[in-house]
């Protein structure tokens, strides 16, 4: 919430037009946008000075630390999602992407200044209030800003720039008409694979995981304990969610054992077979996997099918409208780039 300093193009487009990520894995991917910058910019191998200026955009400077800080933040967010051997390559790609995003930000900043777009101070205060309300209990905005070596005035300035940038984009797309139902029907007919839904189940489980290196007797004890837990659930002495919260070794215990909704190929084979063959509401027999012993309860089972046009229509219209606006914004930013003086000091 607090990283307003980096006003990257994709974020501003999302803020301006309310694009939302799809919840349905079979639905349209609204996140795809045109990559305007195919020529990679490499980091300067001769210096690691964080204060070194690596790019000038119409005289405005981008320092190495601005790029490095955002790259580090992004890598932290990725966490353990990327295999370690891929991290160096990913970090280089991220450096290139962030540098290009910052070039965009400088171009937009200059366009905002040239357009002299006013920003209502009340709108800035409303953004500040939203940030304050979203902070963890016991944390203050001032404390977090201090940790980042930022001030409240700097944050307000960044928010002012962001809101002005949003207005600038809205001005560029003011004449773009919304997609029609006919447009949506054509897209639906021409992209049938986008509207296929896989077979899915919504399920919870309780996992008892024997200690690493446990012998057969210890494993048998874990299995017997799970049998006992299963019996108490079936007898109505406790609910599945209560038992999961009290006994499960899986982090899902915090959600009553809920694993959410998943399709085939997302779980280990033994677990998948049980989940997709159980009756809804049944407390299944014990399943052994590489993780330990499980009991599973399925709450929903959806067969493979096709999303009806009427169900998808509004989403398609929004997607096509946003796509048209994004194309206009992309062309606008490309024009700014073509007219700009961009000095890459790392070449």
Image (cartoon, rainbow, N blue to C red):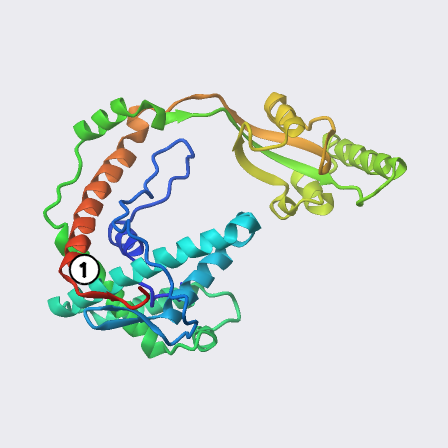
Question: What residue is at 43 percent from the left and 56 percent from the top?
Answer: 92
Q: Position of residue 157 (x, y in %)?
A: 28, 73
Residue 62 seen in the figure:
yes
- Is 339 left or right of 280, judged from the image as shown? left
Relative to 172, is 252 above or below?
above
287 sits to left or right of 204 = right
Q: For the residue carrying disc 1, how many other residues have a C-alpha within 10 Å: few (<14), some (14-19), or many (20+)?
A: some
For the question of whether residue 239 can be seen, the reply is no
Could you say where residue 116 lies in the image, as x and y percent from the top left? 13, 69
Judging by the rendered image, the residue that carries numbered circle 1 is: 167
| Quadrant of the snapshot with the C terminus | bottom left
Residue 236 placement (x, y as % from top left): 72, 33
Q: Which residue does the image show at 29% across and 45% down from the upper left?
A: 33
Residue drawn at the location 24% of the way across and 54% of the way down: 16
With respect to residue 138, does 18 lie above or below?
above
Does residue 161 sit above or below 146 in this rendering? above
Q: Give SS at disc 1.
A: helix
Query: Looking at the image, is 55 positioned above or below residue 300?
Result: below
Apparent side of residue 142 relative to residue 184 in the rendered image (left or right): right
The quadrant in which the N terminus is found is bottom left
Quadrant of residue 153 within the rendered picture: bottom left
Q: Give percent across and percent down for residue 22.
A: 38, 40
User: In this rendering, would 117 be left or right of 72?
Assistant: left
Q: Which residue lies at the image location 32% right of the left edge and 54% below the top edge?
A: 40
- In depth, the one of 44 and 61 nearer the eye is 44
Q: Please tell me how many numbered marks the rendered image carries.
A: 1
User: Image quarter for residue 152?
Assistant: bottom left
Furthest residue toward left: 175
């Amino acid at each position: 919430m607090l990283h307003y300093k980096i006003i990257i193009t994709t974020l501003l487009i999302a803020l301006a037009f309310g694009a939302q990520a799809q919840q349905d894995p079979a639905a349209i991917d609204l996140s795809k946008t045109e990559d305007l910058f195919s020529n990679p910019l490499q980091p300067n191998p001769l210096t690691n000075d964080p204060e070194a200026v690596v790019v000038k955009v119409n005289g405005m400077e981008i320092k190495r630390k601005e790029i490095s800080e955002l790259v580090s933040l992004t890598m932290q967010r990725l966490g353990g999602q990327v295999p370690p051997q891929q991290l160096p390559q990913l970090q280089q790609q991220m450096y290139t992407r962030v540098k290009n995003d910052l070039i965009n930000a400088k171009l937009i900043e200059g366009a905002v200044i040239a357009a002299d777009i006013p920003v209502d101070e009340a709108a800035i205060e409303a953004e500040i209030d939203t940030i304050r309300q979203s902070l963890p209990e016991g944390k203050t905005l001032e404390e977090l800003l201090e940790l980042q070596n930022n001030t409240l005035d700097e944050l307000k300035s960044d928010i002012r720039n962001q809101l002005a940038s949003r207005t600038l984009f809205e001005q560029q797309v003011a004449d773009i008409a919304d997609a029609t139902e006919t447009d949506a029907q054509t897209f639906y007919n021409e992209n049938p694979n986008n509207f296929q839904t896989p077979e899915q189940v919504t399920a919870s489980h309780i996992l008892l995981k024997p200690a690493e290196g446990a012998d057969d007797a210890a494993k048998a004890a874990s299995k017997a304990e799970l049998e006992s837990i299963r019996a108490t659930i079936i007898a109505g002495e406790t609910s599945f969610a209560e038992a999961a919260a009290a006994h499960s070794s899986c982090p899902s215990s915090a959600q009553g054992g809920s694993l959410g909704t998943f399709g085939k190929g997302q779980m280990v084979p033994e677990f998948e077979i049980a989940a997709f063959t159980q009756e809804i509401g049944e407390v299944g027999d014990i399943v052994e996997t590489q993780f330990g012993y499980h009991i599973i309860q399925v709450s929903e089972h959806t067969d493979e099918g096709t999303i009806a046009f009427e169900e998808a229509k509004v989403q398609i219209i929004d997607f096509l409208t946003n796509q048209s606006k994004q194309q206009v914004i992309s062309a606008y930013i490309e024009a700014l780039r073509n007219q700009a003086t961009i000095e890459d000091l790392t070449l």
